[in-house]
Image: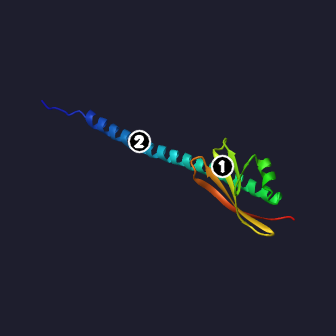
Amino acid sequence: MSYQRSKAPLALMEQIIMILVFALAAAVCLQAFVYSDTLSKQGELRDLAVMRAQEMAEYCKAEQGDLEKIGVMLGAKRTNDGLEADYPEDNIRVVLNIMESGDYIEKAKISVVAAGGDEIFCIPVSWQKCE
């Protein structure tokens, strides 16, 4: 009488290894999707920050640095050395700090700050004073 060994355990082991390989590949793909989503959100926030900073810079140039008018147009509040505009819907704050004020030209720095206090974007801006 001869006994034949069943090949079922070998097939089962092969299937388990294949499942583990696919699970590992799925985990790597999932990490890539999460990372790309994070990068996308960071890019979107940076684009929004650039747009808000540019908006304030354009108002500064158009109004020749009249911070009262700019504050009214943007809904910003006056600070000791500039303006501060909150955008709670975007979780950002735009801060304008006057850096240098000459006879004909004023220079300022516009910073966009996230809700956590991290600076997202900043841009220097200058405008000509009208007398």
Q: Amino acid at mark 1?
A: Arg
Which residue appears farthest toward the bottom when viewing the image? 103
Q: Which mark is residue 14?
A: none
Secondary-structure class at tag 1 = strand
Q: Amino acid at mark 2?
A: Phe
Lateral position of residue 2 relative to residue 59, left or right: left
Please state the horizontal and vertical placement of residue 98, each as a whole percent of the image.
71, 61
Q: Dividing the image into 4 quarters, which one contains the C terminus?
A: bottom right
* 26 and 116: which is toward the camera: 116
* 118 and 104: which is toward the camera: 104
- How many neighbours does mark 1 have within 10 angstroms: few (below 14), some (14-19), or many (20 or more)? many
Residue plotted at (40% across, 44% down): 24
Which residue appears farthest toward the front when viewing the image? 80
According to the image, label 2 marks what residue? 22
Which residue appears farthest toward the top when viewing the image? 1
- How many neighbours does mark 2 have within 10 angstroms: few (below 14), some (14-19), or many (20 or more)? few
Please state the horizontal and vertical placement of residue 35, each as a whole percent of the image.
51, 48
Q: Dividing the image into 4 quarters, which one contains the N terminus?
A: top left
CA gap between label 1 and label 2 equals 45 Å
Which residue appears farthest toward the right when viewing the image? 131
Secondary-structure class at tag 2 = helix
Above-or-below relation of 98 to 4: below
Above-or-below relation of 40 to 123: above
Give the mark nearest the N terminus, 1 or 2: 2
Count of marks overlaid on the render = 2
Above-or-below relation of 126 to 115: below
Please state the horizontal and vertical placement of residue 124, each as a whole percent of the image.
69, 63
Residue plotted at (60% across, 55% down): 119
According to the image, label 1 marks what residue? 93
Residue plotted at (68% across, 52% down): 94
